[in-house]
Amino acid sequence: MTSPRAPHPSRPAATAPGSAAAGGSALAPGVAAGGLIPAHAGGAAAARGLPAARGGVGPGSGLGRRELLRGGAALFGAGFGGSLLLGCEGKSGAARAERAAQELAAAQREAARAGDLAGVRLEFAARPAIDGAGATVRRLFPHPQLQHLDPFVLLDDFRVSEPAGFPMHPHRGFEAFTYMTAGAFAHEDTLGNASVIDAGGTQRFASGRGAYHSEMPAAPGSNDGLQLWVNLPRARKAMTPEYQGEGAGGQPRTRDGAVDVRQVAGRGAASQLHTPVDYVDATWVAPGSWWRTLEGGWNAVVYVLRGPVQLQGRELAEGRVAVLTAGRAELVGGAGARVAWIAGKPHGEPIRHRGPFVD
């Protein structure tokens, strides 16, 4: 995806006051590397010494650690400075509520260690946006409720028809991974690569120290897919850029009960990123349930491409996003339902996202 008036990747962009290059921090106040803190809770969480991961496009706060976000009570405790004032109960009621929140969080951490059921940290709707040269996208994040999700920087669900698209533009510091769900995309870059990827195929563009590429529709009608930006670890930020295009045959497909499971990246897929990921496209061919496990220490989102589906008993409509805690997740859908499961192992490093660059 593109950004207007982007500087050349080999030259640093102008720095704003308070940016890392200007001697300040590229992260929002109270934000450090780690997990996830909702925007409304970032300041309180930082005051309590909780780690967070938020770099971002413009100011904002982070989202908090899994241990904090597991219980609704714990979340509200962080959001209101560590205490809950319930009606007229006063300090004693607040203390009881805080103890209950702590006990709930501890019990849920224990359940996660025992490999019990996953939970839902956060749920929201992807937002419509225009990117590139008139391309229509639904942006999952950056979002007011979720700036980034380490190691993931950005996730778009795009619908592109000619003459719209993503003409030549620069990137640096991350991998842009595109998965086509309908139509086709033509990729060209300044490394000399040119390829057309049809539905079911993927394009991986590791921008490293900087390069230009374009992504344009290559089939009549709507050309649809998901583009995921995955942060490169600090040690690989200056790597030589590289490109990998894979057809639909590069993704292993299995039948898991009522669900057709396509492994888009990671776990035996042809596309292997510089970050461990588990990326799955799951389509229900008949009504039924599907289980997937999120490893401890990993972050994951479930995105509903066609719905509704139920996640741990919670109904999610098309276009809804759920952020998970570790454990086993059950998804229930009818014939035709479809979700993307995207999990990754965090780097534990700041995500400094500035337009087309992640430094």
Image (cartoon, rainbow, N blue to C red):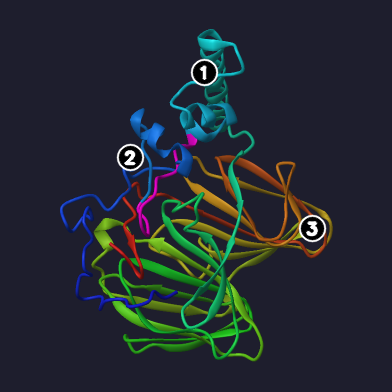
> Percent from the top left, x then y, of residue 109?
53, 28
Q: Residue at x 37, y 43 (%)?
A: 34
Question: In the rendering, which numbered label is found on residue 30?
Answer: 2
Q: CA distance from mark 3 to mark 2?
A: 45 Å
Q: Is residue 334 left or right of residue 61?
A: right
Q: Is residue 334 left or right of residue 66?
A: right
- Residue at label 3? 258
Q: Work out whether residue 267 can be spotted.
A: no
Please tell me whether residue 339 is drawn above or below residue 157 in the rendered image.
above
Q: Start and end of the magenta stretch?
A: 55-66
The percent position of residue 50, horizontal first and vertical second, equals: 37, 33
Secondary structure under tag 2 reads loop
Q: Is residue 64 magenta?
A: yes
Q: Nearer the viewer, residue 103 or 264?
A: 103
Q: Main secondary structure of the magenta part?
A: loop
Q: Residue furthest left?
A: 23
Judge by depth and name the residue closer to the eye, 224 or 237: 224
Name the residue beneath numbered marker 1: 98
- The Cα–Cα distance between marks 2 and 1, rounded to whole angstroms, is 22 Å
Q: Residues within 10 Å of mark 1 (few under 14, many from 20)?
A: many
Does residue 216 sit above or below 48 in this rendering? below
Disc 2 residue crowd, few under 14, some 14–19, many 20+, Cα 10 Å: many
Residue pictured at 63% horizontal, 84% vertical = 183
